[in-house]
Amino acid sequence: MGEQERQPTTNHRKIALALSVIPGLGQFYNKQWLKGAGFFILIASFFIAFSDLLQFGFWGLFTLGTDPTYDHSIVLLVEGILTLIITILGAAFYGFNLRDAFKVGKQRDFNEAPNSIRAQYQNLIGGGFPYLMMTPGFLLLVFVVIFPILFVILLSFTNYDLYHSPPASLVDWVGIQNFIDIFQIPIWRETFFSVLAWTIIWTFGATTLQIALGIFLAVLMNQKGIILQKTIRTIFILPWAVPAFVSILVFAGMFNETFGTINRDILAVFGLGDIPWLTNPTYTKIALILIQTWLGFPFIFAMVTGVLQSIPNELYEAADVDGASIFQKFRGITLPLVLYATAPILITQYTFNFNNFNVIFLFNGGGPAVPDQNAGGTDILISWIYSLTMTSAQYGKAAAITMILSLIVISVALWQFRRTKSFQEEDMM
Amino acid sequence: MRNKNRIIQLTFSYAVILAMIVIILYPILWIVGSSFNPGNSLSGSSIIPKDATLKHYKELFDPQQSDYLIWYWNTIKICILTMVFSVALVCMTAYSFSRFRFVGRKNGLMTFLILQMIPNFAALIAIYALANLTGLLDTHLALILVYTGGAIPMNTYLMKGYLDTIPKELDESARMDGAGNLRIFWQIVMPLAKPMIAVISLFTFITPFTDFILARILLRTEEKFTLAVGLYELIADQFGNEFTLFAAGSVLIALPISLLFLSLQKYFVSGLTAGGTKG
């Protein structure tokens, strides 16, 4: 559609839009009989087919059931979300109907012939093609990704836990009580803040170490005169090549206090053979950060190696002429260029470790247990959520904590993407 | 003076490299050594066992004694199906986003951008409750669906970025020659996107392979386990008592995957880099 400056004399577009409040009428007004009838029938049948579900679904969503013998609150919640999704789809179609009436009305205002049925058909097939291609993926996304997210959001406002769980009893809306409890009930508050503090230390400690080691080794290997460069690089990649869950479980064995090789074979040499790696939280934390460094540096190493090979040699030659030392060259040339090229990926490394459930859980199950809190000594937020859900059935609280966690991750990620150029482009890429 | 510095620098470098090689290889050698250890536990054994034995490997391969082969088969099955479904859905979605301008496109891209930030296991309560309600708990179907759904947002972004670099003139000239949308998709664009299809296949194959948390939540019975869950149970059930068996199991997982990974490593690096900078 070309941009047109002249003012139309007729006002078909507004009339058609107003009439379209009842779907189809606007199309009738635009003399698109078939389309109008189609729209009318579609919306009407939507209301007829779903009116019961809509009523019942919203009732269930609002009350979460009234009688525990008949009503299963969680089923009602799920049906409620389903109703919500169907309503949104219906509303979207309704909006499309309004838009269509307005658009065709505008075409008439500008004296363009409305599309013939044949042209409309072709338009529908051509214009519908992207929708057709996306539907399967989109539907799956709605049901296995968006649906669970909605479910967690709603769940965080309920008292769903061991004592309020169907079929024995009903679940109720409690507003933001879960969030208040987490910050007010002492045991929850203390647990939350100690878990959060460790999560932050863990994220920054482990990630920064793995990045530093990766960059350091990449620079080291990039020197001229290192023999067997290719072989050594392959060895450095190995920790990344082995599936992480295998390595972590192997480490759990190595750090084991009775038969693990760390105490028995290595530290025993120095007379330190009885360090409580798995029963003292501090030692477990140290071990975890070391393990994650082992697991995580190869990716940084491989990536930075790629960047280093693209830095033009002239820069270093010029620095040599100026008499710069190795460290000056590293700080002035290498590091800025590497960080500039890899910054977005480095940030994703931080968000990855923030949610690195595998290493925490597989190494020591989030343990050892510590008194006065309901999370293990090395639990990070995500593994705490896991144990709240799977072992203590604190679903409502777990959902609330999930919300807090997602908020943190999304704000960090948005902050990151806002800075990347792609975000600002019209095309978003 | 300059030469002396150079020697110090190289000596230091080799010392670091040697130390790193030891740190990297030690766990690997230790677990390989353990897997050949004749006893069930490690107490009183040395890293290089004196009377090495293959009996733990035999035990794993004997269906009467362990479910290991079933876990292997389950994992391969889940990974391949996830890969096939994800690649198909991702290609179709990314093609639409890359080649068409339609109502809702921008909002759709925005939704994908936000969805790829939240790991899909953050909603693990919901996934558990929903699987429970729909009767999909303890089925591989549930796992495949969740993996595939979780793979769509990020990989669609990767794929769209790649398709955007394929000139649209190719589509147009094919359209002139009378090719329809499907035909352009299948015969023009997809063959050109092969490198990125390879990257996405790798990602969507390896992600379910290394996932632990979702499989752990959704799978309940031992015959349904994937390798990650099975291996964990092997070690968690009776820690230390079956350690040598666990060691053999680990070696058999790590070996093929590492070889696959090392031979395709450049795809991983390029894929992850593209995802990070363009997403």
Image (cartoon, grey):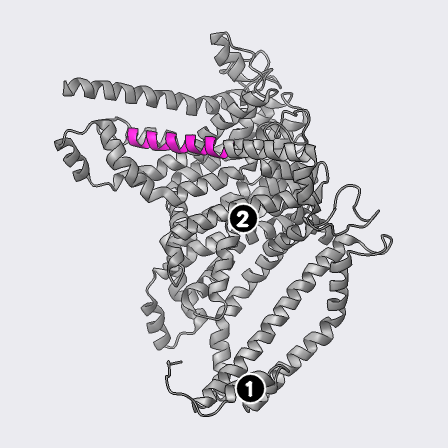
Label 2 crowd (10 A; few <14 / some 14-19 / many >=20): many
Give the percent coordinates (x, y) of residue B221.
70, 39
Residue in the image at 57% along x and 49% along y:
B147
Q: Amino acid at mark 1?
A: Ala
Q: Give the numbered dot on residue A371.
A: none
Q: Give the numbered dot on residue A16.
A: 1
Question: Relative to A259, does residue A206 appear above or below in the rendering?
Answer: below
Q: Is residue B67 visible?
A: no
Q: Which residue is mark 2?
A: B118
Give the percent coordinates (x, y) of residue A22.
64, 82
Query: Numbered disc 1: what chain?
Result: A
Q: Amino acid at mark 2?
A: Ile
Specify start and end residues of the magenta stretch as a single range.
A202-221
| Helix, strand or loop status at disc 1 | helix
Give the percent coordinates (x, y) of residue A237.
39, 33
Question: Relative to A155, does residue A52 appear above or below in the rendering?
Answer: below
- Alpha-carbon span between mark 2 and mark 1: 42 Å
